[in-house]
Image (cartoon, rainbow, N blue to C red):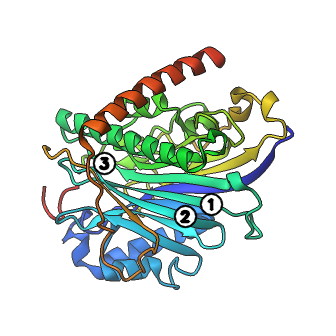
């Protein structure tokens, strides 16, 4: 189609931390041999994905667990790990494994929502290198976010999920706006943005919120509908809750501009098993990984390349709470595999000026969306999540 494209694979995988998995003899965390056997299978599965970026949830921040994953005998030879532990007494968190040869980390932001539930997210600003390890294009930058929203034990938890997702969207848009200013206001150079993780919900209010912000689910974009089953809950329900969302870069960071994104493939693993039921012999986790392959494209003639053309894919027959503060952290020297916790430098609220800025952004966003429509027609320390 005349575009210059480079392939980039991404995956999201909730590992089911040993402190949350119940066995006949109690919590799996008490039996090192048991959880090690299961997580060695997880390591093998991740290796087989051959992805450049893997977002993991329920990553257990215990040294012996981290050794299994981050040592050279695990994933450490190929991948660099960057993680963010949940606050208070929680033992798990989220993290990224990034291919050392393919991904160059430019910036890291830790996000702690601050609401009841102690949930977190992790944002990376990175540059994707080609297979030879070079960086031929300025617009190969990416924003990649990994999160794990609250499990909906009740109706109030669903409201909390929406609150968490709303805060995440605000932070992503703020980061994008700051990048725009850093680039001298040149919106055409804004990077594509990807948001992955365990959203603990399907096609609901959180799903539609991401759509409102210009994001598209990679699985649905490629296969025509969402995967019905990616998670077997603790109460035996089969649900689809794991997603990799994308939003192309460009002038508005919503579809237009130089950087296009195409979904070459998107599958629920293991392959060969329908995404409409839980695989009987899959014991690695209570979640199935989602693996998506993206083509990051530079249109040869941006003026003649419409959003619909850039986004077009052919469907395939797939294997088918009261504290409201928010903390974000930044680091330029990423912690080593032995460092126990996340970065803790906090930013503070900016009062009235921030509210005014938010109103202005919201107004501008609404006007921008209107123009676009016209133009392209889980209380215990380690027993409950």
Answer whether labels 2 and 3 touch (C-beta < 8 Å): no
Q: Look at the numbered disc 1 and give the secondary structure of its residue.
A: strand
Answer whether labels 1 and 2 touch (C-beta < 8 Å): yes
> Which quadrant: the N terminus?
top right
Q: Name the one closer to the observer, 7 or 360.
A: 360
Q: Look at the numbered disc 2 and give the secondary structure of its residue.
A: strand
N-terminal of the pair, mark 2 or mark 3, is 2
Foreground tag (2 vs 3): 2
Q: Distance between the residues labelled 2 and 3?
A: 36 Å
Q: Distance between the residues labelled 1 and 3?
A: 36 Å
Residue 256 appearing in the image:
yes
Q: Look at the numbered disc 3 and give the secondary structure of its residue.
A: loop
Q: Residue drawn at (61%, 14%), measured in percent from left and top?
A: 374
Question: Viewed as shown, does residue 330 lie left or right of 353?
Answer: right
Circle 2 packing at 10 Å, graded few (<14), some (14-19), many (20+), is some
In the image, which disc is placed on residue 371? none
Residue 222 image position (x, y, % from top left): 63, 37
Foreground tag (1 vs 3): 1
Q: Name the residue under label 1.
A: 127
Q: Residue drawn at (71%, 32%), measured in percent from left and top?
A: 312
Q: Mark 2 points at which residue?
A: 106
Residue 263 figure quarter = top right
Circle 3 packing at 10 Å, graded few (<14), some (14-19), many (20+), is few
> Which quadrant: the C terminus?
bottom left
Q: Residue drawn at (54%, 56%), measured in percent from left and top?
A: 11
N-terminal of the pair, mark 1 or mark 3, is 1
In the image, which disc is placed on residue 233? 3
Residue 48 image position (x, y, % from top left): 60, 67
Q: Is residue 382 above or below residue 220?
A: below
């Amino acid at each position: 189609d005349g575009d210059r494209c480079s392939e980039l694979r991404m995956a999201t995988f909730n590992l089911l931390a040993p402190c949350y998995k119940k066995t006949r003899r109690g919590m799996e965390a008490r039996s090192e041999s048991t959880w090690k056997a299961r997580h060695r299978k997880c390591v093998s599965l991740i290796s087989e994905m051959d992805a450049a970026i893997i977002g993991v949830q329920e990553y257990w921040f215990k040294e012996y667990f981290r050794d299994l994953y981050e040592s050279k005998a695990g994933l450490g030879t190929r991948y660099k790990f960057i993680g963010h532990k949940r606050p208070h007494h929680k033992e798990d968190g989220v993290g990224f494994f990034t291919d050392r040869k393919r991904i160059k980390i430019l910036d890291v932001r830790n996000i702690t929502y601050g609401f009841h539930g102690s949930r977190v997210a992790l944002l990376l600003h990175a540059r994707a290198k080609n297979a030879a390890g070079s960086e031929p294009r300025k617009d190969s930058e990416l924003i990649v976010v990994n999160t794990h929203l609250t499990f909906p034990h009740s109706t109030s938890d669903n409201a909390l999920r929406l609150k968490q997702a709303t805060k995440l969207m605000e932070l992503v848009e703020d980061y994008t706006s700051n990048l725009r200013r850093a680039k001298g206001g040149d919106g055409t150079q804004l990077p594509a943005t990807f948001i992955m993780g365990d959203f603990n919900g399907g096609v609901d209010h959180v799903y539609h919120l991401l759509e409102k912000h210009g994001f598209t689910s990679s699985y649905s974009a490629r296969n025509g509908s969402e995967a019905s089953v990616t998670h077997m809950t603790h109460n035996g329900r089969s649900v689809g809750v794991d997603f990799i969302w994308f939003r192309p870069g460009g002038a508005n960071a919503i579809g237009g501009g130089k950087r296009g994104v195409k979904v070459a493939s998107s599958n629920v693993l293991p392959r060969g098993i329908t995404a409409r039921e839980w695989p009987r012999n899959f014991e690695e986790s209570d979640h199935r990984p989602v693996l998506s392959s993206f083509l990051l494209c530079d249109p040869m003639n941006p003026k003649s390349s419409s959003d619909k053309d850039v986004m077009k894919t052919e469907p395939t027959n797939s294997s088918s709470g009261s504290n409201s503060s928010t903390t974000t952290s930044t680091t330029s020297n990423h912690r080593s595999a032995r460092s126990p916790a996340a970065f803790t430098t906090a930013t503070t609220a900016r009062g009235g000026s921030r509210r005014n800025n938010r109103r202005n952004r919201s107004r501008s966003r609404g006007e921008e969306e209107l123009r676009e429509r016209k133009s392209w027609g889980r209380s215990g320390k380690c027993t409950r999540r």
